[in-house]
Image (spheres, rainbow, N blue to C red):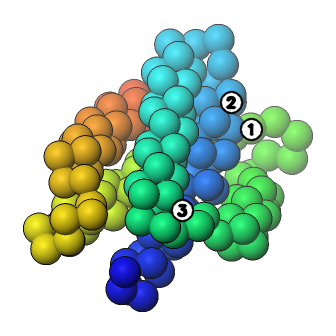
Amino acid sequence: MSDDLHVHLQNHWTAATAGVDFARRVARSHEGTAVGIALAEVADEVADDRESLRQIMEQLGVRPARLAPLAARVVERLGRLKPNGHLIRRSPVSDVLELEALRGAVTTKGAGWDTLVVLAETDDRLPRAWLSQLAERAREQAASLTAIQRDVAAASSRP
């Protein structure tokens, strides 16, 4: 296996690990609402996608990194400390910013799947059909998050 593919997979594993934590946290912040239900579904799919990545890595003999995902989790938790203009409660802008970030992460995940689809054209070890399905699911997740983010932004702008 090329070192480049190994590095690509390791980097996406690291991002996926932080992404699962982030998606679950964003969903929990909307628990008990229709938005929370939709976000929980996306978070479950994001976790399933990370498991798919782990399976692909295993098939290729790539071990998931141990330290980089830990560092990514620490960074994700530190990101919670962003100023939002409120000391005790969540600001409506926090919801919008988190949804924008989650949408960006899912779009990046999709780009990673797209890259692997291209690499599968010359590497028979990569499951092209499965990778294509994962890329399509990432596009569907991004579209869902776009709609949710727009609804939350509209609601946050109401007096």
Which label's residue is closer to the chain start, 3 or 2? 3
**Residue 43 appears at what percent x and percent y?**
53, 34
Q: Which mark is on residue 13?
A: 3
At 49% from the left edge and 58% from the top edge, which residue is drawn? Answer: 58
Crowding at mark 1 (Cα within 10 Å: few <14, some 14-19, many 20+): few
**Residue 79 appears at what percent x and percent y?**
72, 61
At 76% from the left edge and 65% from the top edge, which residue is drawn? Answer: 70
Q: Quadrant of residue 149?
A: top left
Q: Is residue 113 above or below residue 34?
A: below
Asked whether, in this view, residue 131 is left or right of residue 1, the answer is: left
Which label's residue is closer to the chain start, 1 or 2? 2
At 57% from the left edge and 52% from the top edge, which residue is drawn? Answer: 19
Q: Quadrant of the N terminus?
A: bottom left
The one of 109 and 147 positioned closer to us in this rendering? 109
Q: Is residue 83 above or below residue 35?
A: below
Q: Residue furthest bottom?
A: 3
The one of 94 and 67 positioned closer to us in this rendering? 67
Q: Is residue 3 above or below residue 46?
A: below
**Residue 41 appears at what percent x and percent y?**
48, 24
Q: Nearer the viewer, mark 1 or mark 3?
A: 3
Q: Nearer the viewer, mark 1 or mark 2?
A: 2
- The amino acid type found where label 1 is placed reads Arg
At 25% from the left edge and 44% from the top edge, which residue is drawn? Answer: 130
Secondary structure state at the residue bearing disc 1 = loop
- Real-space CA distance between mark 3 and mark 2, rounded to the nearest whole angstrom: 24 Å
Secondary structure state at the residue bearing disc 3 = helix
- Real-space CA distance between mark 1 and mark 2, rounded to the nearest whole angstrom: 9 Å
Q: Nearer the viewer, mark 3 or mark 2?
A: 3
State yes or no: discs 1 and 2 in contact (Cβ < 8 Å). yes
- Does residue 46 appear anywhere in the picture? no
Asked whether, in this view, residue 79 is left or right of residue 151, the answer is: right
- The amino acid type found where label 2 is placed reads Ser
